Image (cartoon, rainbow, N blue to C red):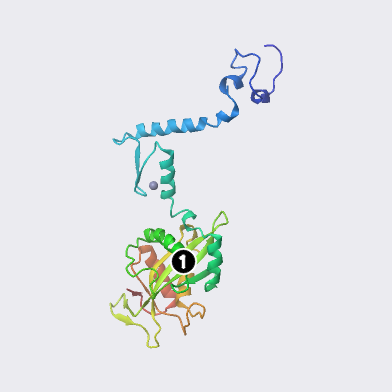
Amino acid sequence: MSGKKRKITDFFNGPCKEETGESLKCPKKSIFPTEPKKIAKKPEKREKLDLSQRILDVGQENIGNLHCEACNMIYSVDSPKEAERHRIFHNRFETTVNFNIEQNLIEILKTLPNQKIGQHRIVFICAKMAGKIVKTSVEYWMKFVNESVGYVSESTGLWDENRRVYLSMGLSAESEIFLAGILVAEKLEEAINEESGETTKKCKNDDWIVGIDRIWTHKIKRKLGIGSALLDAVTTRDTKFEHRKRRLRVAFSELSDEGRVFAQKYVGKHYENEPFLIY
Ligand SMILES: [Zn+2]
């Protein structure tokens, strides 16, 4: 040893010009012989190595392709691009990215009839009020909503004159406004009493029965009362939404198990001693 004292920082202050032959004494020289910019590339190389290792471990016939059973996507683990595409697709219902509401759309939604129910701002949309931007956005969200709730038949179209759309906005962790919940209702002439199988007709005073065609709440906003607020918006008296004398009857269509529990609870609370209606 030369006796020259060195601090730990000496190792990071550029190549050591002395003692070039002794790597242990000058790790900077031997481990990081190039300039710092190139160091950043190292992890990527390691990652690629790990991925190829994974393929060998899996031992699949179709080397390099993985089948995600959760989302049913087949993708190549060799391609960072495909892996990223899988990540986005896999999390399409969990993230808010597909449900973001841009500022210009927020400004438009503000002009539509809306009401605060509990903590939730509910916006009312029907075909004659909504312009192209609103319709296009709702249709885009609906693709994800339909897949999420298992809805397949768009027989009469979202903007049929007997249909109404209600939506609720939420705030993400990144402080972005997104679609927190949506409900598609339709005017029914009659519905079926689930217990007796009898048909219940609309009231004499011409109040229609509200058919709940679809109701959906974003995964990160569940159990916060958004579903109830949407149902309240469509069934209770509100001159902004539509003129009514009293709470309208409600009937549900093709409910999931989870949806049925929620709907029964809602009906039990607001329609005491009345049957559960379906259509
Ligand atoms: Zn997946």
Mark 1 surroundings: few (<14), some (14-19) or many (≥20) residues within 10 A: few
Q: Is residue 112 above or below residue 88?
A: below
Q: Disc count in the image? A: 1
Amino acid type at circle 1 is: Lys
Please give the name of the residue rendered at 28% of the width and 80% of the height, measured from the top-left corner.
Answer: 198
Query: Residue 196's image quarter?
Result: bottom left
Name the foreground residue: 66 vs 198. 66
Name the foreground residue: 225 vs 185. 185
Is residue 117 among the parts visible in the rendering? no
Q: What residue is disc 1 on?
A: 132
Q: Is residue 2 above or below residue 37?
A: above
Image coords of residue 116 (percent x, y): 55, 72
Q: Quadrant of the N terminus?
A: top right
Image coords of residue 25 (percent x, y): 62, 17
Q: Is residue 202 left or right of residue 231?
A: left
Name the foreground residue: 49 vs 99. 99
Does the numbered disc 1 mark a residue whose Cβ is under 8 Å from ligand 1? no
Image coords of residue 61 (percent x, y): 28, 35
Furthest residue in direction front, as rendered: 132
Is residue 43 among the parts visible in the rendering? yes
Q: Quadrant of the C terminus?
A: bottom left
Name the foreground residue: 205 vs 200. 205
Query: Residue 83's image quarter?
Result: top left
Give the structural element (helix, strand or loop) at label 1. helix
Image coords of residue 72 (percent x, y): 34, 48
Furthest residue in direction bottom, as rendered: 204
Please give the name of the residue rendered at 44% of the width and 48% of the height, measured from the top-left corner.
Answer: 88
